Amino acid sequence: MNLMAFILMDFWRNFRNFGNTFFIVVLPTALYLFFGVYNDWSEFDVGNGNASAWIMIGMAVYGAITATTALAGSAAVEIQTGWGRQLSLTAMPHGAFVLAKSVIALMMAVLPVVVLNVIAYFTVAQMPAGVWVATIGLTVIAALPFALYGLAVGLLFRSDAAVGAASGVLVIFGFLGNAFMPLEGVLLDIGRFTPMYGSAALARYPLTEGTIVGTTGFVGTDPLWAVLLNVVVWSLVFAAACFALQRRRTSR
């Protein structure tokens, strides 16, 4: 099977899956419109932009992370249930299958980022052009470690239903990770140690420059090293889980 043909076919299959599309594109867009556009605080100044831009970035991070989680988890399930062996009967080698799935996951991750940024541009979000470009790139980069999270879930449970549940858990991660709405106090203290906090803070860094915004205004700062440490540590945790689960699978 031609690699490009497989990528386009599988991308279209995943895009047509209502469950995938809803959590990856529709839900983040609806949340952005509700919280980031149709509210009095949407045009309040936040860093190098406004509150609408702050909310949009968080929703884009959530959508991109949901995409990488779902696609990586599904790929792991497919390989373990024999789909990889079926493809090996065609002209597509195993390495090409992995490459194709990686490209599809990236395409699906970019999709909500593009949709949300376009909608934000034509509504009330405001950021300088350079900041806008930087946040788009960082949003996609910040979502990549969650491919390891999805892969670990797929290796552990070997079930599409489990991968779907893992994607649903991301709603909790998004709330605790300060992606959906500003946190303060104890919730913020707890949230700093959760998986999505670093990803959201990294994507917003060009906008906020580390400033933490709460419902009452400025509530602190996140140094860049702390944001990167969160991303690196959780990436290592997810990678270690994948390695351990793969070794268990191989030993069997």
Image (cartoon, rainbow, N blue to C red):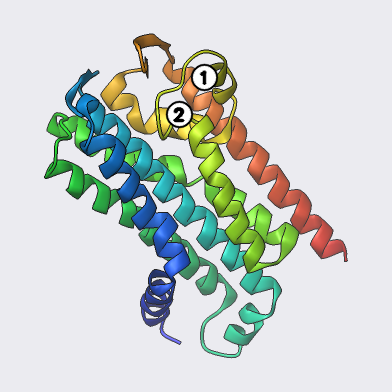
Please tell me which residue lies in front, 35 or 58: 35
User: Of label 2 and label 1, which has the lower sequence position?
Assistant: 2
Residue 230 position, x and y percent, is 55, 27
Q: Is residue 106 visible?
A: no
Quadrant including the C terminus:
bottom right
At x 76%, y 54%, the residue is 245
What number is the disc on residue 95? none
Q: Are marks 2 and 1 in contact (CB under 8 Å)?
A: yes
Q: Which residue in the structure is indicated by mark 2?
A: 178
Q: Is residue 158 left or right of residue 136?
A: right
Q: Is residue 105 above or below residue 116?
A: below
Q: Is residue 142 above or below residue 151?
A: above
Q: Residue furthest right?
A: 252
* Other-residue count near label 1 (Cα within 10 Å), few / some / many at <14 / 14–19 / ≥20: some
Q: Is residue 69 above or below residue 180?
A: below
At x 50%, y 73%, the residue is 96
The amino acid at mark 2 is: Asn
Q: Is residue 131 visible?
A: yes
At x 45%, y 60%, the residue is 105
Residue 221 position, x and y percent, is 41, 11
Please tell me which residue lies in front, 41 or 101: 41
Quadrant of the rendered image containing residue 132 = top left
Residue 86 position, x and y percent, is 62, 86
The amino acid at mark 1 is: Leu
What number is the disc on residue 188? 1
SS state under label 1: helix
Quadrant of the rendered image containing residue 81 = bottom right
* Other-residue count near label 2 (Cα within 10 Å), few / some / many at <14 / 14–19 / ≥20: many
